Image (cartoon, grey):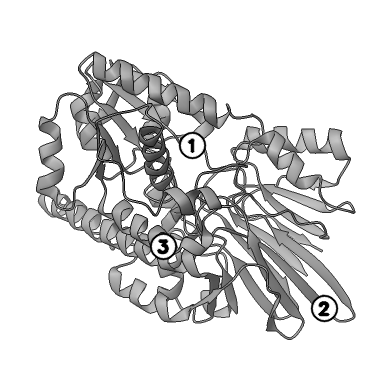
Amino acid sequence: MKLAFLGGARTVTGSCFLLTVGQKSILVDCGMHQGRDAEEVNSRPFAFDPSSIECLFLTHSHLDHVGLVPRLVKEGFRGRIITTSAAADIAELILYDSAHIQEADTEWDNITAMRTGGELREPLYVRADVDRVLPLIQRKHYGKIENLCEGVRYRFVDAGHILGSATLELWCRNGEEEKKFVFSGDIGKKENPIVHNPVYVEETDYLTIESTYGNRNHKGIEESIDELVDVIHSTFKNGGNVIIPSFALGRTQDLIFILNKLVKEGRLFRIHVYLDSPLAEGITRVYEAHEEYFDEEAKALFTTESSDAMRIHFTSGTEDSIKLNKIKKEAIIIASSGMCEGGRIRHHLKHNLWRKECSIVFVGYQAEGTLGRKIVDGSRKVHVLGEDIVVRAGIHTLGGFSAHADQSELLGWISQFKKPPEIFIVHGEEKASFDFQKVITEKFGYKTHVPEKGEEFGL
């Protein structure tokens, strides 16, 4: 048996792991790299023949876990794609949106290239490639052990990260010996809105675990909610807008849930929330259709009508989005992308980032090299849509809204194993991964690795 780390190694995005069992090749996630050098990294040839892959497991539907699946199919993959039902519905929206962006960006770049005599390029994939992905998807439920093929069994358990997110358990037999592999996916923190808490796994021989927040702990969720309320009140009092860059999947739905709850509790009143993301609106509809994944509080609150004191406005077309630029005060605008690398959020930053009466609220992780990271790190001027914009707005980072487990919660998750696993630490910036390795070694004494991209281990 061999395990290769082809993405998400010493970096937060682009998760992709290849497990070889005899003649069988199994892929876990096939994500898109985001941040610095993203276009070049995502265009590199796969480190394997896509047609040789028997099965692709998807732990959840964030772009950094599913974003290169259409390219995989475009280049010859014809195996099964196995994930949960909610993850499958969300992946469809995510991938069509990604394809649309690929096509539009390529068209724009090629117009410029033709004018300047530059080289034309092709998109990574187009919507027709996504069409070919969908028939390959098989939908599974949490908790049931299934047979993949001779000698390989699997099960999904709830990772508590976003709707339909899963930790993958794999039992693989090669000859007389059976070994168990666990791929954590992205583990949610306890008390994430809407979804259940993560399910613990108690036994494995080999564990591949994320480390996004492997070297830090979050503020408490209630502390972050209190800060959000304070930011909204003070910003509105100063005559500005609250701009929230948010991932269309997961964080946006959590924010709607929390804002609705705050209104029902009387802590906010007469607020107008503008959801400027057709993708986020579509994903919100998927959430509403999958009540079976909700925790009890979400079932009681998320499925009821919003209070009259909270008005949610969905902006579908470009014209509706442009109209938001005329709103100068008392608006909460939620738009993607969460790291400010694309989408409509850039336009709202362009119109509000320079205004000292406004506030920019970051509620998710900002990868190295992204526009969001530059703002969070204190840049006084940033390049947005072809212009250098001075940063005068208040910048707030609310770590308690992260959907990822922090260091203490990750350690608590690992502590449930009944016998020592061999651990591979992935999906974290290099320092976070090595810091997490040190803590695991000190606390448990387990054998650990922080793989380099492309590194393969014989097991």
Mark 2 or 3: in front is 3
Distance between the alpha carbons at the discs numbered 2 and 3: 35 Å
* Left or right, 33 with reference to 358: right
Give percent across and percent down for residue 383: 27, 28
Which residue type carries mark 2?
Asn
The mark closer to the camera, 2 or 1, is: 1
Q: Are marks 2 and 1 in contact (CB under 8 Å)?
A: no
Q: Residue at x 63, y 55 (%)?
A: 454
Label ID, residue 365:
1
Circle nearer the N terminus (1, 3): 3
Distance (Cα) linking label 2 and label 1: 39 Å
Q: In the picture shown, does residue 135 fall above or below 448?
A: below
Q: Nearer the viewer, residue 246 or 198?
A: 198
- What kind of residue is marked 1? Tyr
Of residue 427 and residue 142, the one placed in the foreground of this image is 142
- For image coordinates 56% across by 50% down, the residue present is 161
Q: Position of residue 223 (x, y in %)?
A: 53, 24
| Quadrant (top left, top right, bottom left, bottom right) of the C terminus | bottom right
Please tell me how crowded label 1 is: few (under 14), some (14-19), or many (20+) other residues with Cα within 10 Å. Answer: many
* Coordinates of residue 9 in the picture (x, y in percent): 62, 48
Q: Quick one: SS at disc 1?
A: loop
Name, please, the residue furthest toward the bottom.
Answer: 150
First in sequence, mark 2 or 3: give its number: 3
Left or right, 339 with respect to 220, comes to: left
Real-space Cα separation, disc 1 to disc 3, in angstroms: 20 Å
Q: Is residue 410 left or right of residue 130?
A: right
Mark 3, residue position: 90
User: Compared to 388, does 415 lie above or below?
Assistant: below
